[in-house]
Image (cartoon, rainbow, N blue to C red):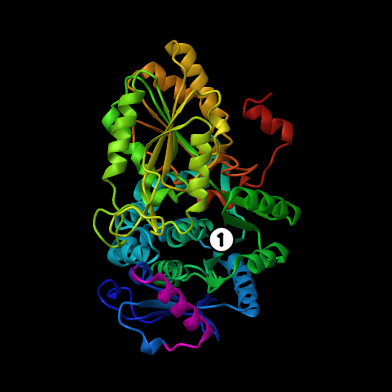
Amino acid sequence: MAQSATSIATTDTLLTYGSYVAGEDVSGDRWVHVLSTRAMLEDSFRSLRLKRDLDRGTADVADQEPGTLVGRVALADEEVCRRALSSAAEAAVRWRAFPLERRLDILAQVHEAVRAHAADLIRMLTVEGHPLELARWEYAGMLAATGPVAREFLREQLWREYRTEDGRRRIVRRQPDGVVCVNPPANAPMSSSMLAALAMASGNAVVVRAPRTSPLGAMFGLREVIAPLLEAAGAPPGTLNVVCGNPAPLLKMWLESPHVDDIMYFGGVDSGLKFEQKCVAAGKKPILELAGNDAVLVWRDADLDHAATAVAEGFYGSGQLCMIPNQVLAHPAIADELIARIADRARALRPGYPDEEGVVLSPVLRHDGFHAFLDDAVTKGATLVTGGRGLHLDGTPGDTGFFLEPTVIRVDGLLKARELDAVREETFFPLIPVVVPEADEDGPLLDVLIDYVNTNRYGLRNSLWARDTAVIDRYVNEVVNGGLLKINESHISFVAPLPSHGGTGVTGGVFGEANYPVLRTTHLQGVAISDGTRPPAYRDAAEEGLL
């Protein structure tokens, strides 16, 4: 490690991390260098050339201007990656024997450590290119996932004990699966790695792949925040391992390794569903966090200001997040007014450096997909309300800019809406379609809208904005799609003890549901304990009123 985490938010000292295996820092012959986002935005061609030269070893780290180079991470070779798996397997056997309360105490300590490292964690998120407002949101998610309400819920789920009148014990508990490997996404590596690593609280050992394209944040969070807590708690070396490498060879190694029990995979739908099949064939539990195409339903009596603000959360990170609003279902009676308010909020957003206050837009590296979705929608009858162009860093329109204008389109007619790619699929761009169904009586229209939400092939989060309690009750009772439902709340906010991730359909795969890493990496087990004078089975049942 280059230095302690207490000062990196205010210095330009280079952060250096080797692989983290069995509690040791393992250096390497090859390094992945991380440049500041400011440098990349100011001169992308020079920065990319510099990164290439640094990674190849043809440029000297010491020669770089202050503020250009943020850190470097060792690229793990095959031997190091295999050592990470074997050390995790050895640690898992010892770590799962630790008392549950002792392991759960780690969550409380992580919560306090995250608070203590607030400035540094947020800075690391901006280094990953996340705008400051988005970084603060991700930081809030870390706190919610480890806070007292979440910890109490997890404790209840991990161990429930009942006693009979004669003192016999009946326990329903969740036991750790063993070794959990985590493949975080390149768009949110640090926050995803931090949350996934919480699987250690249930007794698992963890191996995390720090993405080669953006490894520094994951390394920093796991090494500076979580690893010291494990060491202080006496966790076996190897309970946490972190290596940087390319996904394909590491995923193949994990599938083939007898040490691995679960694989948590973040990624696209097509690759993720294929990987799920490979996991099942290899006897591994797949835990998928794939794409989202979240729907926000705005009813005729909704608070339109609040609803429009929640919909505009879909522009956070320029739409390059899985759990943001991707489409809006607007009641015909309020559609025009709602669209106008969403468009006003979209026009008010401006690009900027990620560490600047008020910035929520991120660079979008490839604009061709955005224009393909938009052209498809307009060709099929959608109306462009606002946006649709590229933006330069200073906010002026231009096809060569790194950014995209927040874009709103109107789609009239629910029945054919899913013929549009921008409605049917996750866009991953700052593009929000507002679908206005045909006017109808409230009852039938609500039936149609609930069916529309339930038949979305994605299922991460869904939202409703309405005042009518009958409408709210029907929505809550009848919407089965999605890992999380939000009613008259921010679509993207973190609300303990509810989960932050997980979902149904192609979002979570065949085994998809709300995802608590502490729970998803475990399995249910029942335990019966008596005093040794066990009666015949039928007498046991009779005494408990089952016969």
Task: List x then y, in percent, for residue 59.
Answer: 45, 87
Q: Using the rendered view, name the quadrant where residue 46 is placed.
A: bottom left
Query: Residue at (42%, 13%) from the top-left corner?
Result: 442
> Disc 1 residue type?
Val
Element marked by disc 1: strand
Q: Using the rendered view, name the quadrant where residue 105 is placed.
A: bottom left
Q: Is residue 182 above or below residue 83?
A: above
Query: Residue at (40%, 77%) from the top-left corner?
Result: 71
Q: Residues within 10 Å of mark 1 (few under 14, many from 20)?
A: many
Viewer-closest of 157 and 340: 340
Viewer-closest of 150 and 490: 490
Query: Is residue 186 something that shows in the picture?
Result: yes
Task: List x then y, in percent, for residue 492.
Answer: 38, 43
Q: Using the rendered view, name the quadrant where residue 475 is placed.
A: top left
Viewer-closest of 450 and 80: 450
Query: Residue at (30%, 26%) from the top-left corner?
Result: 337
Left or right of 524? Residue 200 is left
Check disc 1 and report the residue beneath it: 182
Q: Is residue 475 above or below residue 151?
A: above
Q: Is residue 400 above or below residue 148?
A: below
Q: Which residues are magenta?
A: 42-60
Query: Is residue 480 something that shows in the picture?
Result: no
